[in-house]
Image (cartoon, grey):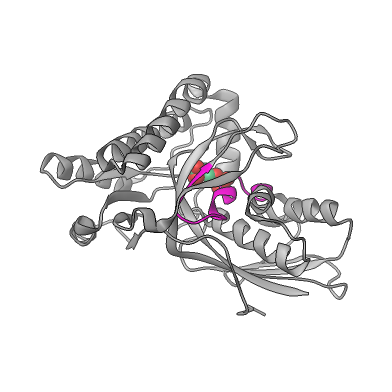
Amino acid sequence: MKASSIANANIALVKYWGKRNKEFMLPQTGSISMTTEGLQSHTTVEFDPKYKEDVLIVNGKEYKKGDEEYDDYVGLFLGVVREMTGKDIKAKIVSNNNFPTAAGLASSAAGFAALAAAVNETLSLGLDDKKLSMLARRGSGSATRSVHAGFVEWKRGEEEDGSDCYAEQLFPPEYWPEFRMVIAVTSKKDKKVKSRSGMKQSVATSPFYKSWAENVVPNHIEAVKKALTEKNFKALGETAELNALAMHAVAIATKPPVVYWNAGTMDIIHAVMDWRDEGLECYFTIDGGPQVKVMCLEKDAEEIAKRIKEFDNIEDVIITKPGSGIKITDNHLF
Ligand code: PMV
């Protein structure tokens, strides 16, 4: 009973930041993202009575009971799977990412989307993509979007049991193949505040939270959907950039403060604004970490990557485009 799957990280154009229900991982707002190509999580899972405890190995590191990753992430997720199936067999999970983990590159999104798909396969649950996105959501909110390829909307839903809270594809990758994100990796270190605890504090204490959730996000969702429908790059970039800044304003005003930016982050923010003034069309977005993702079109991607590399505090530059959803593979990690 072993299965493996590959999923790509997604980058939010309209951010998710805060839950209304922790148990079911129901968000306060809807969100929209682009699933990337090549920022992969490859995960193998096996359920077998030979395991006395669940085993979790991520990027070669084994996590044990008491570790946040083990209890809060996989422990909870496997609990949901066991409740669904009524079976209490222990599992071994091995997951490798080919990009920095826990540093604002949505590693948990790719990881849980891949895990949900592998669990579905190995336990023959027969979940379709909508149901899979709901299962992935129970591991990490943003994972609900990584199930699908291309541009994706995660619907907030209204129901308290989460039955109308899932992700749907808006447009496939082929719809806008020239769209690019140039990722400036400004630090590969693990972030100090995980999204999960940062957003929880923001809901509880940020003075801007309510107006962000009620006024800002619904408008941005509509604006981004319209911009995608019209393939209006300027409108999309402007809205996504404002949306990222609004989310970080909420986070920064949280008690205790959630400040993900470092000096490299600030350098690229200012550079993007300057380049735009010079006529190089690009916009930035930033998730729960210090990396800056610069949105542009294919024709400008190499030039932007070259300019980013000229900064001192940049550790890596990755160019990505709209990519694929979950895939089952025979390539097992153990
Ligand atoms: O799903 P989480 O707990 O990794 O939270 C993701 C939060 C952001 O990346 C900041 C925004 C988003 O929508 O992906």
Is residue 174 or residue 113 the one in the foreground? Answer: 174
Is residue 183 or residue 221 the one in the foreground? Answer: 221
State which quadrant residue 235 falls in: top left
Where does residue 286 sit, x and y in percent of width and height?
39, 44
Who's the residue at 59% across and 30% down the image?
28
Residue 152 on the magenta segment: yes
Q: Is residue 143 above or below residue 196?
A: below
Relative to 139, 172 lies left or right: left
Is residue 54 or residue 20 the one in the foreground? Answer: 20
Residue 334 on the magenta segment: no
Relative to 197, 63 lies left or right: right
- In this view, the residue farthest toward the left is 278
Relative to 227, 33 lies left or right: right
Where does residue 192 sit, x and y in percent of width and height?
52, 47
Where does residue 227 sit, x and y in percent of width and height?
34, 38
Where does residue 309 sit, x and y in percent of width and height?
23, 61
Q: Is residue 65 above or below residue 195?
A: below
Q: What's the magenta region?
A: 137-153
Q: Quadrant of the C terminus?
A: bottom right
Taking the image as drawn, is residue 329 in sight? yes
Q: Quadrant of the N terminus?
A: bottom right
